[in-house]
Image (cartoon, grey):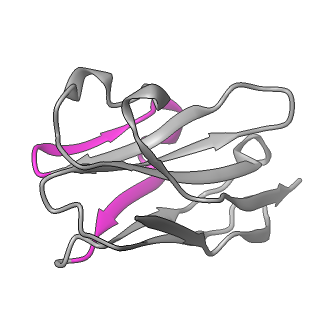
Amino acid sequence: VQLQASGGGLVPTGGSLRLSCAASGRTFRSGRMAWFRQAPGKERDVVAAISWSGSYYADSVKGRFTISRDSAKTTVYLQMSSLKPEDTAVYYCAARLDNELVAQWANPSAYGYWGQGTQVTVSS
């Protein structure tokens, strides 16, 4: 199973970007997919997650970011709007094959599959 993230780039404050994460090898129809981000010198933090039970967002991105996935459940998207300099980070997609441990949706350790990361830089 491989996760391939793409869509990062350099945008001005207030701009928008759409990240994509394509899974190959299998689908995650019954599982959970998520986006995390890691800024230099900081821990990897959850941004959003999605499963059949719903979507979940970090407080810092609520109302600005939207997570979604395609009907085949092989690609997850992160639409980012009203971007701020503090959103600058490497963004990683993650997945697990089931939707267990829903209460751990924000915990990186709850995901067994990871993409390679894509850089998002928001200029001030």
The quarter holding residue 72 reads bottom left
Based on the picture, tell me whether residue 55 belongs to the magenta stretch.
Answer: yes
Which residue is rendered at x = 55% and y = 62% of the image? Answer: 81
Which residue is rendered at x = 36% and y = 58% of the image? Answer: 67
Foreground residue among 88 and 71: 71
**Does residue 71 sit above or below 114 in this rendering?**
below
**Does residue 35 sit above or below 119 in this rendering?**
above
The quarter holding residue 105 reads top left
**Residue 106, image x, y percentages:** 41, 28
**Residue 28, image x, y percentages:** 23, 61
91 left or right, relative to 9 = left
**Residue 117, image x, y percentages:** 66, 58
- Quarter of the N terminus within the rendering: bottom left
In the displayed image of the protein, which residue is found farthest to the top? 103
123 left or right, relative to 108 = right
64 left or right, relative to 14 = left
What residue range appears in magenta?
Answer: 52-70
Q: Is residue 84 visible?
A: no
Foreground residue among 105 and 109: 109
Which residue is rendered at x = 64% and y = 32% of the image? Answer: 44
| Total count of labels | 0
**Residue 98, image x, y percentages:** 18, 44
Q: Is residue 108 visible?
A: yes
Foreground residue among 109 and 20: 109
